[in-house]
Amino acid sequence: MSAARRAPPWRRRLLGRQNQNLWFWVFVGPFFAGLVLFIYVPIAWSAYLSFFEAYNTVSPTRMVGFANYTDMLGDPNFRSSLTTFLVFAAFIVPTTFALSLATAVLVARTRVAQAFFRSVFFLPTACSYVVAALIWKMSIFSGVRSGLANTVLGWFGAESVPWLSVTNPPWYWLVIVSARLWLQVGFYMILFLAGLQRIGPHLYEAAAIDGATGWKAFRHITFPLLRPTSTAVLLLLLINAFQAFDEFFNILSSFGTYPPYARPPLVYLYYTALGQGQDFGHGSAGAIILTAVIAVIAVAFNRLFVREAD
Amino acid sequence: MSPSSRPSVPSAAPSDAPLASADAPQAGPGRWRSNPALTRRSLLSLGVAASAMGALAACGSNTGRDEAPVGGGGTSGGSTPTLNQWYHQYGEAGTQQAVQRYAKEYPDATVKVTWKPGDYDQSMVATLLTAGAPDVFEYGNGPTIDMITGGQVADLSDLFGDAKADFDQALIDRVTYQGKIYAIPQVLDSQVLVYRKSALQKAGVTPPATVDELLAAAKTLTSGDVKGLFVGNDGGVSILGGPMLWASGLDYLTKENTFGFDDPKAVAAFTKLRELFASKTLLLGAPKDWFDASALTQGLAAMQFTGLWNLPAIEKAIPGDYGVLPWPAMPGGAPAVPVGAYGACVFAKGKNVDAAKKFVKWLWIDSTDRQLDWAQSYGFHIPARQSLVGRAEKLKSGPAAEAAKIVTDHGHAQTPLLWTPKCSTAFGDMMTRIVKEGADPKAEIAKVKAVAEAELERLGV
């Protein structure tokens, strides 16, 4: 303390009152450094690489301007991966939303063993995506008769279905979507449960007096008051859909190859930039384009759902 | 840093996520209306998303900025240099001890062996960008073309001497670029068509010699849940492209390094694969894919195209009840099997390039006893040299001897050196679209041709 008093005024100003600034950096500094070193430098480096021809190197010398970007935008496979994402998001976001909301409402209503049901639905969240994907691929949806799904079909005398090997009908979507729903619904259910608990019981009581129960109460009280939670859940779901990698990769890839269908952007970029390809220029350009797309969607989402609420 | 270990839920968001706000005093919906929290959250989440993209790129980029030598071939001051050598993790018991023993037995340098589990190819290409790369390393089918043109691997041509003719020609061609040899093949691996003798006899089927006979056999051998043929859970998409081209007398690239299968014969070959896929005689969705023999040994399929390495396991499970065949011929073509090998390479930017070259010459050219030990004592592989095949006890009789002969007579290098990963991806997409989705082979081949020709141009061919 005395040291601070004796110090020149510029230094006192730098350290702040009671060395506040110093302590701020002592506590925040390591995390900030980590953030800069492991997040922001790589992002900047990636942006830098996207303007170069960078095969097998991260310190490229040949600048190619926007060529990597035009290549990626002209690449039918990259465009189809973006379409895959859009179709996937258009399906998985509302489905997960509806299912987790429904489970949350049901669990909140339950008078018996509520804690038990809450835990049971939440438990899959603790499961690794990779492990779940392998279980889905190898034991539930394996193509032979011993697989769980085919055993069930066998009870009804149906033929075995090679779920992941055929594309017509595209059964692989059933496998991917069911795995993702199993893994995610519990987590969003907890978010909705938290939102539900914030709605005061007196509102329902008042509504009941006016004759609004059941569906009417849900439609006019629960759903509108859940709006903040719903908005957050929607955005999280959308971003999660964009990040789709684990279950796709582990369910559909085999020996360093990935089929051209159901190939989301991250999987495609993984094969472009990592793997044996090591084409960091195109990979980085793809990552930047993808980030831009997410940014646009998130801003549009913000305008649409948040501004409207103001 | 593997993307597959990324948590599914953005980890930075919860600081402002609704889960946390559940504990907050009951503020009612009005709080949300007047509060810019959501905007902030969107931005935060956006940051998370952006970070994820960055992290993807980071997996690659943080490998190259490491300028400090990480134990990279530092000389031990005195007479003998220290060499670092990398192997991928072999599955067979005793392999690790064997390579350590070879290293110890080498008199002219201290060789430190690193045994790499996990995704070897990827960590190898990443390490080669740094000064910490090993002096000596193995790589599947020799170095990639980008490693060669990038000057990462040393020219080993002068090490071979008279022994050059003794090595499998297909493999030497595979690791040769502009007349220079860049790797020494260690052992041969291949894939063959294995069939159950008893199943074929029972159905009155003779071992197929043409693709048409194979299709007919698969049909006869299919009954109920037992399928006729297993060529992988993807219906052969990832392993049959090459064999079908060679069986038709074609290849990925011609000898002059131009596109090799813009040809009606290729259209016919891929159409056959589609026919096979649609015939319902293929086993699809087996718990273990083609690299494991359990589909055959457990009776899920009567024939299987699988790795040579499975022969000991098959012999153990169904002793004597199996035979081996090459992938059968298309009309006007010849039977074919793929041949691959791990090749020993020398890092050209290391500190002890000459000592490293001397070491690989000693181990993979001069020490024939050690090469034979490596091929025969731990798993089942074929020595890369003709003279050693004759000395290999395990290859002297039965299906193993047939397999060795098949590889010598019908072997083709898995993919040409100039067939880059980008070409492979385009080829895989083509195979999937033709075989699984019934797309027009001619149009799909044209798409691959465009990609391959652009790649060849990039490489200056």
Image: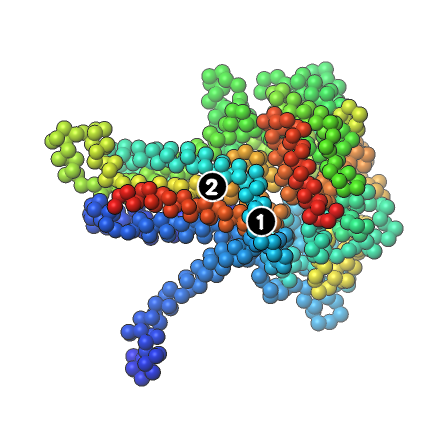
Residue B86 locus on image (x, y percent): 67, 54
Q: Amino acid at mark 1?
A: Asn
Q: Is residue A103 above or below residue B358?
A: above
In the rendering, which numbered label is found on residue A244?
2
Q: Residue at 21% of width from left, 33% of height from top?
A: A220
Residue A272 locus on image (x, y percent): 58, 45
Instruction: Decide if residue A154 is on the left or right side of residue B368.
Output: left
Q: Is residue B366 above or below residue A84?
A: below
| Disc 1 packing (10 Å; few <14; some 14–19; many ≥20) | many
**Which quadrant would residue A257 be assigned to in this image?**
top right
Residue A284 locus on image (x, y percent): 54, 51
Q: Please name which of the two marks, 1 or 2, marks the residue nearer to the observer.
A: 1
Q: Are marks 1 and 2 on the same chain?
A: yes
- In this picture the colour scheme is rainbow
Instruction: Tell me if residue B187 can be seen.
Output: no
Residue B430 locus on image (x, y percent): 63, 33
Instruction: Please name whichever residue, B398 or A228, is drawn nearer the observer in this view of the structure.
Output: A228
Instruction: Decide if residue B269 is on the left or right side of residue A184.
Output: right
Q: Read off the chain for label 2.
A: A
Give the Cα distance between marks 1 and 2: 24 Å
Q: Residue at 73% of width from left, 38% of height from top?
A: B259
| Disc 2 packing (10 Å; few <14; some 14–19; many ≥20) | many
Q: Residue at 53% of width from left, 39% of height from top?
A: A79
Q: Amino acid at mark 2?
A: Ala
Q: Read off the chain for label 1.
A: A
Residue annotated with mark 1: A68
Instruction: Decide if residue A42 is on the left or right side of residue B448.
Output: left
